[in-house]
Image (cartoon, rainbow, N blue to C red):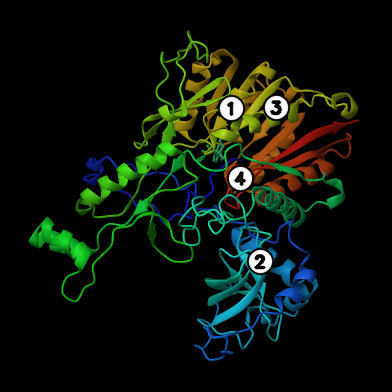
Amino acid sequence: MTTQPPSPGTSSPPHKRLKSSEATNTIDIISTNEFTEINEAPIKSSFLPDPTDIIPKASTSSLTKPNGEIKVKGKKNRKQKRNLPEKYSAQDVLFHDVRDFLGTNYVDELISKKEGLEWEAPEELKLYEEVTLTVGAFTVSGESLSLFPGTKPWAIITPFAHPGDKIRAKIHKHDRLCSFADLIEILEYSEEYRGGEGDRRKYPQNGCKYFGECGGCQLQPVPYPLQLLHKKRTVQLAYQRFSNLPQDILPEIQDTIGSPKQWGYRTKITPHFDAPPKWIQKQLKENGEEAAMNSLANGNGERKGWELRIGFERKGRPGVMDIEECPIATPVLNRKMTEERKRVQETIMSFQRGATLLLRDSLPNPNPIPTSDSPFSSETTSKVETEDHIAITNHKLSVYEKVGKYIFSFTAGSFFQNNNSILIPLTEYVKEAIFPVQETKKLKVKLPNYLIDTYCGSGLFGITLNEKFEKVAGVEISNDSIIAAKKNAELNGLKDKTTWLCGKAEDIFGGLDEKGFKGEKSCVIVDPPRKGCDEPFLNQLLNFKPLTIVYVSCNVHTQARDVGYLINESEIRGKEKNWKYVVESIRGFDLFPQTAHVESVAVLRLLEN
Ligand SMILES: C[S@@+](CC[C@H](N)C(=O)[O-])C[C@H]1O[C@@H](n2cnc3c(N)ncnc32)[C@H](O)[C@@H]1O
């Protein structure tokens, strides 16, 4: 799947809808919450030392007051809720990170005793106390893991610190085998994991002034090659932890493909803002706009003023932080953000509820607009330079993007990959994976004639790969997206070669046979949302028995689960007739540089005797 990680600064606050009266402000809110799950998957990464090496290093830490004195007082630990995380969720991934960090034998033995000791923080580690720590590892989600030097092995998770940093952190929550802390100060900086282009200590003009507060990016100071290594390690860990497959039947995880653009790449951002509080709205009603505006800044009697903040979620705290620019968003979106912020600032009194703005990078309308009779062609359509791009803020308006020689149009509120710069490498890679140039003979693979693009969105894979196939079918649950897929097929002159169906992904299998799509001649692309596929879909996919399955995913943990299911089930179902699927390759793609998010592509091939 190729989904959306964090809108910068995202693990978005709940989207709030405008009242219809407010809609006249023409601020568009997004209707889907596709970003909210981005900051998942923490952990120790490949470029980190083995946890056993880390422990002695981390044990130099101490529980101190800011002045270095040992501090033991504090509020009594609150009783923790003992809910276990949902499997494959971000919390579950984090638990695996902690388990690996503290030692799997130790953790498993402790839990097997069923005494609940894994929920009990060391006595001397108090909530709201400050501790000094040496960071030992990254979590998969790009936060830091440190060992608390107390009476029992215990991890502390702190954002915005890197392995090797010495930090001061304030504990705010105890959890299972770990506590969460806010970063107070970095006392010593690790040189190994810093010094990347976005490290403002080294390059004050670069990166983002909000790094360290905004919840959007986790890895900005980390040199880019190490960011890619971290993501490769994330993919490796996901398959170790969640695939339920013996590791020796999996191929070696390949290096993560980097993004051509590492800054200014993000083509969609969704800043949020809250409406003025009720007491200011009351002022507005009773005393008019001027009085209310005064209250905004200065407060009113005993009340403090209220500050309008338009931006992204603050890491570790509720509420939005005010953000003027986002260096991972495209230039046109940053220019538009300035305009939109001004507009909201000037009209804030008309909002009774907060809202989420939508800003989407688009090419200008192509000239001439392609049609099915006169399809898009780079030669005949006017050339567009980066600076000609426009920003769309109305979620119903059409956005145009080019991927190689194809043009895509979709409504601004619907799904499309958010980093255009990597879409050619991604789609070319998928094409070459299906039709390996050199190894075809060696592998004795049968090559497919038909492509089935499941979870197809507006047709990205079906359209960009079409040339290699006799015909293409796509299925997608969103009506807006399937309308876009049909239109995109027309714009690119592919109307007769393609079939698009609106429905659940598994609905496609019922009608494929009569349309002439046989499993034995097909490749199926699977690109689901973060939660992955459900079993009815996977079972029907196995019944269809395509030659090749390419599973693209923005959540490598659910991908690993689903790939494991397909491989294990195929062993059972194919036993008598001697067929099964094998995993041919697995590789990450960096659709979101500076964040810990990784997209993963797994290629499964049918083997028959
Ligand atoms: C990660 S996006 C991929 C879209 C497309 N492949 C692309 O790269 O642009 C996942 C898509 O799956 C669609 N979807 C979600 N659940 C679905 C289901 N049960 N059946 C079919 N499509 C679904 C979503 O609407 C979304 O467009």
Q: For the residues labelled 4 and 2, say whether their Cβ atoms are less than 8 Å apart.
A: no
| Crowd rating for badge 1 (residues with CA inside 10 Å; few <14, some 14–19, many 20+) | many
Out of 477 and 166, give the one closest to the viewer: 166
Measured as percent of width and height from the top left, residue 367 is found at 41, 15
User: Mark number for residue 95?
Assistant: 2
Give the alpha-carbon distance from disc 4 to disc 1, as whole Å. 19 Å
Give the alpha-carbon distance from disc 4 to disc 2, as whole Å. 20 Å
The quarter of the picture showing ligand 1: top right
Q: Nearer the viewer, mark 3 or mark 1?
A: 3
Quadrant of the rendered structure where residue 161 is? bottom right
Mark 1 residue type: Gly
Out of 471 and 209, give the one closest to the viewer: 209
Cβ at disc 3 under 8 Å from ligand 1: no
Measured as percent of width and height from the top left, residue 9 is found at 47, 54
Q: Nearer the viewer, mark 4 or mark 1?
A: 4
Q: Secondary structure at mark 3?
A: helix
Which of the marked residues, 3 or 2, is nearer the chain's N terminus? 2
Measured as percent of width and height from the top left, residue 464 is found at 61, 24
* Residue receiving disc 3: 431
Look at 16% across and 70% down and name the residue there. Answer: 300
Cβ at disc 4 under 8 Å from ligand 1: yes
Q: Is 502 rendered above or below residue 245?
A: above
User: Mark number for residue 474?
Assistant: 1
Mark 2 residue type: Phe
Give the alpha-carbon distance from disc 3 to disc 4, as whole Å. 19 Å
User: Mark number for residue 561?
Assistant: none
- Number of numbered callouts drawn: 4
Q: Is residue 276 visible?
A: yes
* Left or right of 303, for residue 314: right
